[in-house]
Image (cartoon, coloured by chain):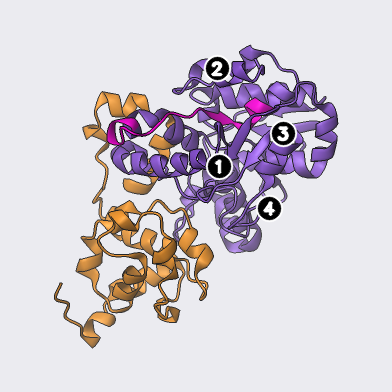
Amino acid sequence: MKLSYFPGCTLKNHAKNFEDSALCALNNLGIEVQELDRWNCCGTVFSFSTDDLIHHIAPIRNLIRVKEQDSDKVMTLCAMCYNTLKRSNLRMQNDKESLDIINDLMYREEVKYEGDVSVFHLLEFLKEEVKFENLTKRVVKPIKKLKVASYYGCLLVRPKEIGFDDQENPTILDNLMEALGADPIDFPYKTECCAAYQTVDKPEIVADRTFQILTSAQNQGAEVVVVSCPLCAFNLDHRQKHTQKKYPEFKNIPILYFTQLLAIALGCSEETLRLDLHYVDPKPILKEKALI
Amino acid sequence: MRVNLSKKRTEDPFVAKVEELSGQNLMVCYQCGKCSAGCPAVSDMDILPNQIIRFAQLGLKEELLKSKAIWICASCLTCNSRCPKGINIAEVIEAIRQILLRKRQDHVKVEKLTEEEREDVPPIALISNFRKFTS
């Protein structure tokens, strides 16, 4: 099986740990991944305004690249890319007039977009295609005795039309962690927004949100928090620096991509985890649990 | 805060523009307040999400355009997912931002960000911030 894959901008730099760990894990599952040729940034946010068609070109062009690969579906890892690609696609599938305008604007493309590509997230693929029970059988290094809080954030579950789990109480990441042998920890802030792009001009808001979210997870006993979005990862991990300044009582907690624990469980080497890209070093807890 | 209401204000083209850009019917809101109850950002807002809808219904254009709240919302969509009337509140707030942004009234001045602010954050943060806060 060969999967068309859209990485998005941040997976190639700040979130290389996300990409490398995911690709190694998929490789160890025997799944071949083919990165799209000439992919471009999806725009990161779905365009809300009814008349703003121009911003749908970026996501839809990527779907044309999928067709050029003779594929009809594309996988994302980043939650923001997932949301943007999937919502733009849905709009085009339901609104022929907008689709015609978009195609007219992209008249130099050799392939026309017809709403005929589907967008899915790696988590959906693991649940629906690989299936968690089969994944458990493939685990070579169980994530034993590690208490993992899964943070879903906003974009995997909202809005309902594109979310692949319950909006108020998603469990897909927890179920995956359990399949890998970890102890999933439930906490009330798992879908609370981390303040996203406010991190650029209002990092103090992110410091508050990071404090609330991570303290809540720690109060439930979490030793690490897993995420699926590079922006959540930046805010919850790197912004702990600001959080600690604002809240001296705050204690650091490592933030991991779910794919890093998946990669460990499936026997990937420590190099593929790119633990050097983290602000809060996950090595001590991973070493303590004999996972690296 | 003193607010003057008039029928004239409700007929301001601003109200129609907000409805058009957001694709929402503002008049279906019955002020239950669930949007504000669930919003993670209310502690930093001067006008709460349910009040934004009410102000928009009443055509309180100036109050909305100068509010801090419209720039605090990060479109997390918790309000949308909980509205019993199916209003997309985040889209309404986006429409108000757009009315300013389309007049080149940017909230974030890219050229004024310090080197540290620019270099420290990943592309995903910069792109989404500029998409939401610049024209």
Position of the N terminus of chain A by quadrant: top right
| Mark 4 on the same chain as mark 3 | yes
| Mark 3 on the same chain as mark 1 | yes
Label number found at residue A151: 1
- Residue type of the residue flagged with mark 3: Ser
Q: Locate residue B108, reporting x and y percent.
A: 27, 43
| Mark 4 on the same chain as mark 2 | yes
In the rendered image, which residue does mark 3 sit on? A4
Residue A136 can be seen in this image? yes
Is there a contact, CB below 8 Å, between mark 4 and mark 2?
no
Q: Earlier in the sequence, mark 4 or mark 1?
A: 4
Chain where mark 1 sits: A
- Residue type of the residue flagged with mark 4: Gly
Residues packed near mark 3 inside 10 Å, few (<14), some (14 to 19) or many (20 plus)? many
Label number found at residue A283: 2
Q: Colour of chain A?
A: purple
Per the model, the C-alpha gap separating discs 2 and 1 is 20 Å
In the rendered image, which residue does mark 4 sit on? A115
The verdict on residue A123 being magenta is: no
